[in-house]
Image (spheres, coloured by chain):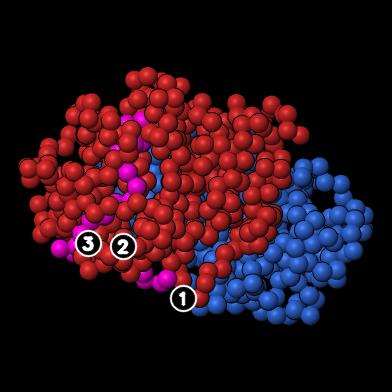
Chain colours: A red, B blue
Amino acid sequence: MNNKKIRPSEFELIEELFAPLAKSQIGAVGLLDDCATLSLSTGNEALYSLDTLVAGVHFFPDDPADLIAKKLLRVSLSDLASSGGTPKGYLLAANIPEDISYDWLKLFTDGLAEDQIEFGIALLGGDTTATTGPLSLSLTAIGEVPAGKAIRRSGAVIGDEIFVTGTVGDAALALRKLDEIGREATAGEFPELYNRYVLPQPRSVLGSMLLDIATACIDISDGIYADLQHICSASDVGAEILQNEIPLSQSAQKLVQGNEDLWQFVYGGGDDYELLFSANSENRTLIESLGERSGIQISFIGRVIPDGGVSILDPAGKKISVENVGWRHF
Amino acid sequence: MNNKKIRPSEFELIEELFAPLAKSQIGAVGLLDDCATLSLSTGNEALYSLDTLVAGVHFFPDDPADLIAKKLLRVSLSDLASSGGTPKGYLLAANIPEDISYDWLKLFTDGLAEDQIEFGIALLGGDTTATTGPLSLSLTAIGEVPAGKAIRRSGAVIGDEIFVTGTVGDAALALRKLDEIGREATAGEFPELYNRYVLPQPRSVLGSMLLDIATACIDISDGIYADLQHICSASDVGAEILQNEIPLSQSAQKLVQGNEDLWQFVYGGGDDYELLFSANSENRTLIESLGERSGIQISFIGRVIPDGGVSILDPAGKKISVENVGWRHF
């Protein structure tokens, strides 16, 4: 059955490709019922994040199907992480055009299967429909969080310290290189950047550790500058971050050393999917220990101030002007 | 702001059209955060049903936007009802092409607003994206049900009686008339049928009353014959239903009296969104009283038998051959 090149029927799709993804999810009832059920631990509430990727808008139609699948899932898992949630399952809506083959869909579901193991979740339900338009994939990640404890963008308090996980700007610099030198050269010369772009690493384990510690949190999808603005706007505060504290990968460091202008991609480039959060300064040591426990680099980068928006300060304390204020996907 | 004909930005869409729909849903946080939260009553579990409608596939592009919105929502609410669930909220993913205007989207969200009041739910979250393809709308209805009590397709037991709500075949007969005589004439001459087709009535109140009473339940979307087959197949049983017990609307009665062949639309036509369920014969009186309490007609139509698939028997006890075995949307 694996060599079919033609478009499968909905029945084949569900029976052969999607049902195996739902096998460990009891409430999915083998994708054979009208509804799926999901139980949460006592005292928890459900957490939802929905993201849609459209071919030609959010990914290149020739991107590998398994990487598209993983990116789709990971983008939503990153949202759950930013709210302090633990992933439980996901729902998938797929609008599938005529020219998508069985083999493509097989690779797509193989990608999902791998990430299901990676993140300890399974498919809960969904719907597949034909479309005359481009391939469109909507995924709703479902998580859980102690009731009332979800970390919001709106909780940052003046005097809080600001932290970010991992390194910043890699995905945007990869995208710049993809435009400049193409996929093969980017993957070959800048694997660190390229891998960050094609395969985000949602901070799922760390997210729930930040419950009751982070006062506000967001995952960096629009760029560190724009996403810090989102926190400040929701929390009614301002923020100052220090350029020389922003964590860069070795590849990014080399690039910005060679061309100062590329710093704008660090400030304004999206798709990093690192966690950007604020916390009371009393928790600095605790946060450092969480970084060690989770194996994720966490960097102090600045402070929450009364207001005046977001400023990035150079080593001399001078405000850096930021040109690119993040991606707009619509 | 209401006379804009041009396509709105994502910000306008969310701020002006979608955020008001989420106002009463605390966990939606004004659609401003990465995740939405939802609490369930103690002892309940979450129930999910996802449906996608694509313009040109599932509805006519010139169907009124408010009716498309309501149909989208109601199709999923009908699934929750068939599982015995109580609706709590919904998530919406919309792929919006260039030529959809602000006014169209305003009418669409007005339709959702009306049904939110009708069914006591509110928007919890979602995602809107641009597409070069047709308008595509995916809605996930979220409900709750006492843990482990969801009514499944698989619980029908030999000897159970089979019941159906409302009347059967109206939507399929409307679709036939739409093909034959067009929208205006169908709406004018067969309002009872036309209204059933454009605006399903999910049996939301009755659904949860059937918990612990219905042994298996499904909502009729593929046609009474095919959907009863789904129950029988999942429950590993057969079923016999009696043609002259199948409840027909007055309009449907007239049509099948004039043309016997139209019975095939009653057996095989989809989109009725009535509940088809099995129950122990001891519960017949209780079921009749639920019909009275909910104001919904419930008709006994047949019995669950050992196996042999689904048979429809004419008044002489002879098996009727069914040609059209339901719609396939893919």
Left/right of residue A81 with respect to residue B143 in the rendered view: left
Q: Secondary structure at mark 2?
A: helix
| Callout 2 amino acid | Ile
Q: How far from the left and from the top, in percent, is residue B236?
A: 83, 60
Image quadrant assignment for residue A172: top left
Left/right of residue A23 with respect to residue A188 in the rendered view: right
Mark earlier in primary sequence (1, 3): 1
Q: Is residue A262 above or below residue B323?
A: above
Front residue of A116 and A3: A116
Q: How far from the left and from the top, in percent, is residue B191?
A: 56, 50
Which residue sits at x=55%, y=74%? B44
Q: Secondary structure at mark 1?
A: loop
Residue with the mark numbered 3: A156
Which residue sits at x=33%, y=33%? A251
Residue with the mark numbered 1: A43
Q: CA distance from mark 1 to mark 3?
A: 25 Å
Front residue of B158 and B322: B158
Which residue sits at x=47%, y=64%? A144
Q: Which residues are magenta?
A: A146-174
Residue with the mark numbered 2: A287
| Callout 3 amino acid | Ala
Left/right of residue A134 with respect to residue B152 in the rendered view: left
